[in-house]
Image: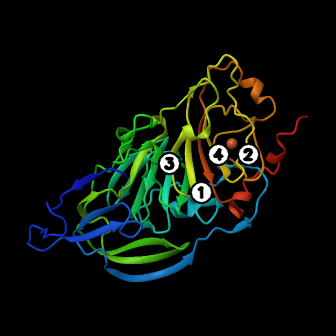
Amino acid sequence: MPFYHKLGKIPPKRHTQFRKPDGSLYSEQLFGTIGFDGMYSNIYHEYRPTQVKEIKKQYSVAPKIARANNMESLRLKGFDVKPEKDYLNSRKTVLTNSDCSIILAAPQESLKDYFYKNTDADELIFIHKGSGKLRTFLGNIDFKYGDYLLVPRGIIYQIDFDTEDNRLFIVESRRPIYTPKRYRNWFGQLLEHSPYCERDIRKPQELETHDEKGEFLVKVKKHDDIFEMVYATHPFDVVGYDGYNFPYAFSIHDFEPITGRIHQPPPVHQTFETDAFVVCSFVPRLYDYHPDSIPAPYNHSNIDSDEVLYYVDGDFMSRNDIEAGQITLHPAGIPHGPHPGAAERSIGKTETEELAVMVDTFKPLQVTEDGLKLSDGTYYQSWLEH
Ligand SMILES: [Fe+2]
């Protein structure tokens, strides 16, 4: 996150002696990304974070590809994903490429029996249903409906859910996820034209410090394998840290829409960026107010990017027959646009209640077996006039 955060206790000068009440040293860890060039934090542990006792298992969780090269517009019925007790097992990759994966999950139980660390990817977890607490070694964050949780790669975490009824839309990104650069000044501060600002970003506020030795299972994801690693000390043993690398939350309900007299293009909805895809939030807003405006979008060719839309709530004005929890995929290479009747239907409307998350990827997405199972098989013909 491009601003400074400090939590817990730290010494006044980095890389200097920082001692426990018994006189022994705390263990310092520099935790950074992109070598020594990216964002980093300096973390102080009760124990050395390197105490691996055993590597018990290694197994692949790579998604099975059903369609490597896809030209079919798809509608995936996301709520057909079956709820499962275990958090990691519940996560079903439906679309993927070498930069990112689109995952749907309906976990029923809190993650308590083990810890999870994804070293492959930043995780952007959108909470469609459910509430609870993201618990990480860099502090905890409460979450609820509409929150994006951004968990940078390497953050060890667990997740508590308040009930069994949870629906998550997750983007795993092998490229770091940032706030869009054009929203920031050269100091990193979010500018006046940004649709959100630092006050909308929720940082970890509650630090759990467990001074415990024993056996602690951490499931570590690396190159699409899970390594079951047993550590000799509790992974949440941090007494303090400072820096720029930490998890945070941002609610889609805090995204302030940008509107205009005529139809505004998708970049006005942009929320996050990487060098491989963008994430946009479509939120309730006033429609275009030119007297002859057509609020529905024009046909468009995202000729060199795949477009994933995840429908969260409200009527989606450009689509007929779309329900919450569904994903549409409009593949690169062919145009798409409003469904028959949608343009006329939109004229004269003054506002929309739609809520959706869009992911536009610059490389084409492959469809997985879990993804294809959710397809209705006919969506690509839904623009035909009868
Ligand atoms: Fe589109």
Would you name the residue on which mark 1 appears?
Answer: 103
Could you tell me the amino acid type at mark 1? Answer: Ile
Q: Nearer the viewer, residue 204 or 324?
A: 204
Give the residue at the far top of this rendering: 291
N-terminal-most mark, 1 or 4: 1
Residue 190 seen: yes
Would you name the residue on which mark 2 appears?
Answer: 301
Identify which residue is drawn at 59% across, 60% down: 101
Tell me, yes or no, whether the two marked residues, 1 and 4, touch with CB atoms within 8 Å.
no
Would you name the residue on which mark 4 appears?
Answer: 309
Q: Marks 3/2: CA distance?
A: 22 Å
Q: Ligand 1 closer than 8 Å to the CB at disc 2?
A: no
Mark 3 secondary-structure assignment: strand
Q: Marks 3/4: CA distance?
A: 15 Å
Query: Which quadrant of the figure has residue 96?
Result: bottom right
Mark 4 secondary-structure assignment: strand
> Comparing marks 2 and 4, which lies closer to the viewer?
2
Would you name the residue on which mark 3 appears?
Answer: 272
Q: Marks 1/3: CA distance?
A: 17 Å
